Image (cartoon, helix red, strand yellow):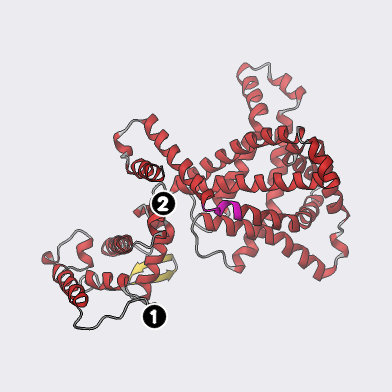
Amino acid sequence: MASRIDSFIRELWAADLGSVGAVPRITIQTARMVIAVSLEFRHRLLNARAAGLVYTTLLSLVPLLAVLFSVLKAFGAHHQIEPVLGHLLEPLGPKGQEITQQVIQFADNLKVGLLGGLGVAGLLYTAYSLIDKVEQALNAIWQVRQGRTWARKFTDYLSVIMVGPLLVVTALGLLASVQNQALVQRMMAFQFLGAWMLWLAQFGPFLLLAGVFTFVYKYIPNTQVRLGSALVGGVCAALLWVVAGVAFAKFVAGSGKYSLIYSGFAILILFLIWLYVTWLIVLVGAQVAYFHQHPTAYQTARLWHRQTLALREQAALMVAGALTRRFMRGDGPIRAAELAGELKLSAPLVDEQIDLLVSHGFLGRATEPEGVILIKSPDTTSLAEVLDAVREVKASGAVVPIRANDPVAGVLRRRDEAVAEALAGLTLRSLAGESDDTK
C-alpha cells in the first residue's frame, strides 16, 4: 500500500499541466497541495509549531491586549476589542463570552502608566514575543533561514501593534455601517446598490477574515510572497476557520459531560483546544500559500531530505547556470528566494547550494541591491570544479579508509578519471547555452 501511494504521488507530480484543460489542471494542483499539506502532519511539523504558539499565546495574550487597549484608547476605539475577541471565541458558545469578559477585564485593569519604564518594556517585549514566534513559524514554513534583523523587527512589529488594530477597527466600523438596517433599507431603493450592499453585509465578515489572513501571509514571513499566493492561503484559512467554527460549536454544545469530569477546568480546556485549532488553521493556510507559490517544492524537498547527491549536483549546476546567464546579460544580484522560484526548486535546496558556491569563491553576496551574483569568470571556471565542490566531504571520518592498491580504490579512480575526461574543456559558459569554441 505504501509503495502504491508513493507511486501515485510521483505520477501526480510528474503530470504535465500544460497538456490538460483548465478543470483537470486545477484539480491536479489542488490534489498536490492537499497531499503536500497532509504529509506535513505526518512529520508532526505543523502540530508542534501550533502547540508552541498556543503556549506563547497564553503568556502574551493579556499583555498584547493591554498594549492594543492603550493604543486604541488614545483614539477612543478601545471598546472595539471586546467584540473582536468575542467573535474569535464565538465557537465556544456562552463560555466564549465568559472568557472574553475575563480577558478584557484583566487587560483593562492592567494600567500601563503605573508600570514604570521597566514594566512597560517588559510588557512590550511580551507582546513582541508573540509576533516574533508567529514570524518564526511562518519562516519555517517558507523555508527562510534568516529572520528579520533586530532593527527591522522593532519597526515592523511596532507598525503591526500600532497600525494593525486601527485598520481592523476601521474595517469593522465600515462593516457595521453596511449591516445597519436603516442604511440597507435606504440603499434598497437602488436595485444594483441594494443587491451589492446585501451581498457585502452577508459575506463581509468572511472577506474581512480572509483579508487579515492574506495580510499575515504576505507581510509576516521574511521573504517575497506573491499577493496571489497569499490570497489563496488567506481564502483557504478563512474557509477552514468557518468550517472549524461550526464543527467546534457543535462539539461544545454536546460536551456537557466534560464539565462534570473537569468541573471548573472545562472552560480552560475548551479554550486551549480552540486556540490550538486556530493556530493550526493559520499554519495550514501558510503552507497552502507556500505550495501555491512553489508547486514543485514538495518533490525537491523529499529528495533533499533523503540527502541525494545527484540532486545536489543538479541543483548546484542549475544555480550556477542561472547566475552565469545573468552575469552574461549584465543583470544585477538576485535574491535566493527569487532564484528558487525561477528554477522551481525548494528554497532550502537553493540556499544550501548558494552557501556552498559562496564558500568556494564561485559566488558573492551583495548588499545593495541584496542578493547573490557570480564573481568568477565563466570562461575560466570549469564544471569539474563546481561538481568537486558539491562532492567534497567536509566531515572527518565520513569516508572509509581504503588502501591504495585496493580494487575499490582503482574503480573509484577510473570513475573520477572518466568524469574529468568527459568534462574536459567545459566551463560555466557551457551552462549558459554557448560553446566555448565561439569565444
| Residue positioned most to the left | 437
Q: Amino acid type of disc 2?
A: Ala
Q: Which mark is residue 396?
A: 1
* Mark 2: few/some/many CA within 10 Å (<14, 14-19, 20+): many
Q: Is residue 253 left or right of residue 332?
A: right
Give the labeled residue for mark 2: 297
Nearest to the observer: residue 193 or residue 439:
439
Q: Quadrant of the C terminus?
A: bottom left
Nearest to the observer: residue 317 or residue 363:
317
Say whether residue 39 is visible: yes
Q: Distance of mark 1 from mark 2, alpha carbons? A: 31 Å
Which residue does the image show at 32% across and 64% down from the upper left?
A: 309
SS at mark 1 in the image? loop
Q: Amino acid type of disc 1?
A: Ser
**Residue 168: image x %, image y %?**
69, 44
Closer to viewer: mark 1 or mark 2? 1
**Quadrant in which residue 256 is drawn:** top right
Q: Is residue 39 left or right of residue 24?
A: right
The magenta segment: 43-48
